[in-house]
Every structure is written in C-alpha cells, then in structure tokens.
Image: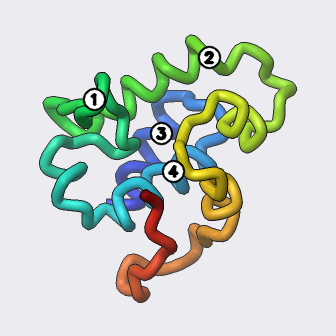
Amino acid sequence: MKDSVYAYILASDIKHPEIVLKQAILETGWFTSKLLMKRNNLFAFRATKKYMRFETWHASVDYYKKWQLTYYTNPKENYYLFLQRKKYARNPDYVKTLKRISLKRSEAAPKQIEKLP
C-alpha cells in the first residue's frame, strides 16, 4: 500500500511528498488502523470531533492536496515547521516522530511506532 500511496502523492504534485507519506504512515500505523482505513482517511482529517470519511483513499490524498494548497503558501518555509505552526496534530512530538519514520522500512517490518493520542 505504501508504494501505491506514494505514487499517487507524487502524481498529485503534492509538495514534500516524503514527509506527506510519513504522515500517512504515522496516522494509519503503517496502513493498519481499522478506524482510519475503513474511512479511507490516510491523514486523520477531522470534521469537528469526528474523523472524516472519504469514498476512496485517493480522495483523502486529493483532500490533503487542497488543504496544502490552501495553507502552505510559502514554499520556502520548512515543511516540518509549517506542520508545527499549523498545529496539524495535537501531540507536541508529532514532527519529531515523523522525522524518525524510515521510508526504507519494509511493510513486513514490525509495525511499532510511537502511538500518538
């Protein structure tokens, strides 16, 4: 799944695709979260307090693209700092955790990553 998501992120011309892929990996627990995967919500987007539901996972990537186009207006801004500034996640260690995700890791590797509240 990781490769398909990454290919679609690239095809969608999303800025900082590797970081965005790491976000999908973190938010879904390497694409295993039943809660988010059954909603096709790779990025844990919420509408009020409930997680949004998308018709397909592609639609959640499309939504991310629109979100990024709306808020990431300075392409010179460090994307990790942008995510922090926008308070993308409630956890103050979100960016630190993203940086620790290795994209070289195989999907068969242990799926233990730090759980975020």
- Image x and y of residue 15, in percent: 64, 32
Q: Amino acid at mark 1?
A: Ala
Q: Is residue 95 left or right of residue 42?
A: right
Q: Give above or below for 97 relative to 24.
A: below
Q: Earlier in the sequence, mark 3 or mark 4?
A: 3
* Residue placed under numbered mark 3 in the picture: 9
Q: Residue at x 41, y 40 (%)?
A: 8
Q: For mark 3, give the secondary structure.
A: helix
Q: Amino acid at mark 2?
A: Tyr
- Image x and y of residue 117, in percent: 43, 57
**CA gap, disc 3 to disc 1?**
11 Å
* Residue placed under numbered mark 2 in the picture: 71
Name the residue nearer the viewer: 39 or 102.
39
Q: For mark 4, give the secondary structure.
A: helix
**CA gap, disc 3 to disc 2?**
17 Å
Q: Earlier in the sequence, mark 2 or mark 4?
A: 4
**CA gap, disc 1 to disc 4?**
16 Å
Q: Is residue 54 left or right of residue 44?
A: left
Q: Residue at x 56, y 31 (%)?
A: 14
* Residue placed under numbered mark 4 in the picture: 23
Which of label 3 and label 1 is nearer to you? 1
Q: Residue at x 44, y 47 (%)?
A: 7
Residues at marks 1 and 2 touching, judged by CB atoms closer than 8 Å: no
Q: For mark 1, give the secondary structure.
A: helix
* Residue placed under numbered mark 1 in the picture: 59
